Amino acid sequence: MVLRFIHSFLFAALAVTSVDADTIDASIISAPGYGELGYQLPEIGSYELPSLGEASNGEVLIAEGERRTLYEIFDDKYVLLAFIYSTCSDVNGCPLTSHVFYKIKSAMKRDNTLANRLKLISLSFDPEVDTPSVMELYGNNFRYAGNAGEWQFVTTASHQSLEPILKSYNQVILRETDSSGRTNVGYSHVLRVFLIDPQKNIRNIYSVDFLHHDLIINDVKTILQQEQKSGEFIKTATVAQQTSQLSKPGDSKLGYELSSYVTDSQDLELRKGEKADLLAIANNPPLGLPAIPVPADNPLSRGKIDLGRKLFYDRRLSLNDTFSCAMCHVPEQGFTSNELAMAVGIEGRSVRRNSPTVYNSAYSNLLFHDGREENLEQQAWGPLLANNEMANPSIGYVLNKIRQIDDYHGLFEAAFDGRGVSMETLGMALASYQRALVSADSPFDRWRYAGDKTAITDSAKRGFEIFTGKAGCVACHSIGEQSALFMDDQLHNTGIGYRESMGIYPDKQQVTVAPGVTIDIDRAIIDQVGEKPATDVGRYEVTQNPHDRWKYKTPSLRNVALTAPYMHNGSLSTLHEVVDFYDQGGVPNELLDPLIRPLGLSPQEKMDLVEFMESLTGSNVDTLVADAFAAPVGDVGKGDPSWVHGSEVEVR
Amino acid sequence: MMRPDKKLWLVLLFTTLSVTMASAATEEIGGDFTLTDHNNATFRLSQLQGKLVLLSFGYTYCPDICPTELAKLALVFDTLKEQSDRLQGVFISLDPGRDTPAVLSDYVGYFNSGFVGLTGSESAVDRVARQYRVKYRRHEKAGGDYSIDHSANLYLIDQMGVLTAVIPYGMPVEHIVDVVRGQLSSNG
C-alpha cells in the first residue's frame, strides 16, 4: 500500500521540482503560483495600481531579537509583506508564499533594480513558536545562497503586539483546536500578500489565486516605470511633505501606541528659524487665497506685525508670567494644540473648547467657535482676560504691566504714530501679526488654480469629486473660482455639541497608560476622577435663540492635516474619524443641520477624501513656523514689574 | 477617593501580568535526540557529527507532502552525488504507531538507500517534534483510519550538530542545493 502511494506521488513530487504546470496534479497543488502563469500579463506600465490605503505600522522583532517598527524595516523600499508561520503545512498557504518569494528572490539575482528597490518580508503570526532565533534560522537560508535582494523574516514579541498588526492588515487568524481540545496546534488564515510602496501605500493585495511571481514583478515594474515617468511629481510630492517638516510637536508622541516608543523631544536650542517678511506674505497671499480684508483703521505695517509677534510669544501677558498666546496656538502644531482635545490654560485650568488654528484667521468674520467676536483686534482680549486662559484680572492690569516692561519701551509709539499702549493698540498689534499668517499654495491650489495636473494624486482628485459631489462638503467648506477659503463664515449644528451636552459617551474609553500599553477604562471610573465637562450650548450662548443650540462655526480646511484634533471640542483625532462622522450623518438631534445626512461612502471614497484634505497643506507653512521660532519668547526677568513681586530679595 | 484608585491599580496590574505571560520565554530550537532507526538500532543524532544533516518529519502513510519532500531531498542528494559522503538525510516519523522500523526501511530506501528513517515511542517522537517546533495533529477518519497534519520544514544541522538553517516547505530543489553547497563549502 505504501509503495502504491509512492508511485503515484513521486511523479507529482518531481513535477513540482521542475515547476511544470501541465504535469502538476491539480488535486495536490492548485495554486497558480507553483506553475506558469495561465494568462498573458498586461504590458508593463499599461495599467494603474492606485493606492488601496495606508499600510499600517506596528512593532516587530527582527532575527537579532531587537525591536523595530514595520516602517523601519520597510526601509523606504517597495515591500512585499506576507504573514506566515513556520509550522504551516497547507500547500496553498505559507509554503506557496515561500515558493513565490523564492522565485522573486531569484529574479533579483538577475535584476539589479528589483534587488535594490524591492524587499521581501515574512512576518510570523505565531510569536510563541516563531521566536527571533527561529527567524534567524530562516534568514540563514540566504547566508550562502544568493545575496542579491533582501528577504527578511520577522516575528513579534507577543500576541498582544501582534494583534493590532493583524487587525490593521485585516488578517483573520483562527487558532485551530484538535479533537482533544488542544489549542495552538495550527492556524487557519486567508493568504494575503501585500505590495507596499515607499510612501507606505498598499498598491496590491495578492490572494492564493493571484500570488504569482510574474504578476508581482510585472506590478512592481509598472509602478517603478510610472514613478520614473512622473519623477517630477514625486519630487513635488516630497517637497510638499517637506513644507510641513517643522510642524510637529517639540515632544513628538508619534508612535506612542507602540512599546518601542522612545522619547522624541527636541531641544529648545534646536528650535531655531529664520525671520520671514510677513508683511510681503500678507500683502500678496499665496496661490488660492484672495487679498486679505484689512480694517481701514488698522492698515498692516511691519512695525505692527513685529510688535504683535513679540506680544504673541510673551508669557508676561498672563497673570503669573507663564502663559503666552502661543502656548495654545503652538506654531509647530498648526498654530493649535495637536496634543489636547480641549485647551489647558494658566495653572492647568481646563478650557472647554479646542484651540482653533490661527492660520488664515484674517478671512474670518466670526471668531471663536461660537462666532461671538467679529474681528481679530477685539478677539485678542478674550483669552487675555479669560480666567482659565491667561487670567489677567483687568484690561488696565495688562496695559499697566506692559508699560512697565523695559523691552516694550517705545515700541507701541513707533508702530502707532506716537500712540502708546492702549486697549486698542494692543489688539491692533496682535491682530496684525495673526492676520499675516496666511497660508496656501498647497498642492491642491497648484492643481486647481495653476493647472498643474500632477500636483495632486489621482486619489486626491477623486476625493475632490466626492468633496464637491456625493459628500457635499463644499456646501459649507466653500471653494471659489479664483480662490478658496474652505469655509462659509456660518455656524452649523453637526450633533457633536448635542452629543456632549446629553452626556452620550461609550461605556469604556481606551487609555494609553504607557507606550504600547492601552487599557479600556470604564466611563464610570473616569467620571469619578475627571472634571465634569463644562456646559456648552454653542451659538445659543451668544444669540439666546433656542434654534442656535449646538451650532458652531465652520472652520477652514486649509492646513487641516496639521491641525488635529478636530471639531469644536477636539473629540475626533484624525481626518479618517471626521470623515466617518459625517458619513454616518453626524449625531441626529432635532436641530441637526439639514445638510448633514448619511453619505454611504465606500472605504475607498473615504480614503480619497482624506487624501484630498491632506493636499490642502500650504507651501509656506514652514516659513511661518520658522519665523515663529525666530520670535523672542518674552519671559519674566529682572526689572520686570512682577520680578519677585517687587521685593528686594536677591534671586540666585 | 480610595476606591477608584484601587480599581485602577488592579486594572494596571492585570495588564502588566498578562503582558508578561504572553511573552513567556521559549527554549532554543533543535538539539540532540535518541530514537530507533529503520534497522531497529538505537540512533543518536550526535553520531552523525562531521556530516551535514538534512532532517525532515513526516509519516509513510502521508499522501502528499512527505513523498514530495523526500523526493526533493533525493534529488538534492543526486545533484550533490560527489559530496554525498559528507551528507546525511534523516526522516523522522510522526506516526510511530504505524511506522515500524520495517515499514520505514522500505519507505526511505525507495527514495535514497542512504537515508535514515527514525521512529520510537509516541512520547519520544513527540519530544523531538517539540524540540524542533514541529506541529502535528491526528485526523480521525471513518473506519479507524487516520491521517496526520504536520508541518514540513527541512532542518539543516551542521557538522557540529548545531541547527543552522530551516528551509521553509515550498522552496525548490535548486535552493536546497544552493544552501547545502554553501554550508559544505563554509565548513571546509
Image (cartoon, rainbow, N blue to C red):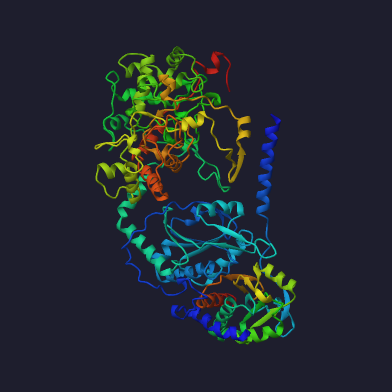
Could you tell whether A91 is left or right of A474 in the image?
A: right
Give the percent coordinates (x, y) of residue A239: 35, 46
Give the percent coordinates (x, y) of residue A510: 57, 41
Query: What residue do we see at 57% from left, 83% from top?
Result: B74
- Does the image show residue B145? no
Picture quadrant of residue B128:
bottom right
Quadrant in which the N terminus of chain A is drawn: bottom right
Picture quadrant of residue A281:
top left
Could you tell whether A481 is left or right of A317 in the image?
A: left
Compare residues A159 and B176 and report the one nearer the observer: A159
Compare residues A293 and A282 and report the one nearer the observer: A293
Give the percent coordinates (x, y) of residue A456: 32, 48
**Can you say whether A268 is above or below A458 in the image?**
above
Query: What residue do we see at 67% from left, 64% from top?
Result: B28
Could you tell whether A11 is left or right of A607 in the image?
A: right
- Does the image show residue A562? yes
Compare residues A649 and A138 and report the one nearer the observer: A138
**Can you say whether A101 is above or below B25 in the image?**
below
**Can you say whether A129 is above or below A431 in the image?**
below
Could you tell whether A317 is left or right of A647 in the image?
A: left
Quadrant in which the C terminus of chain A is drawn: top right
Give the percent coordinates (x, y) of residue A19: 46, 78
Total numbered labels: 0
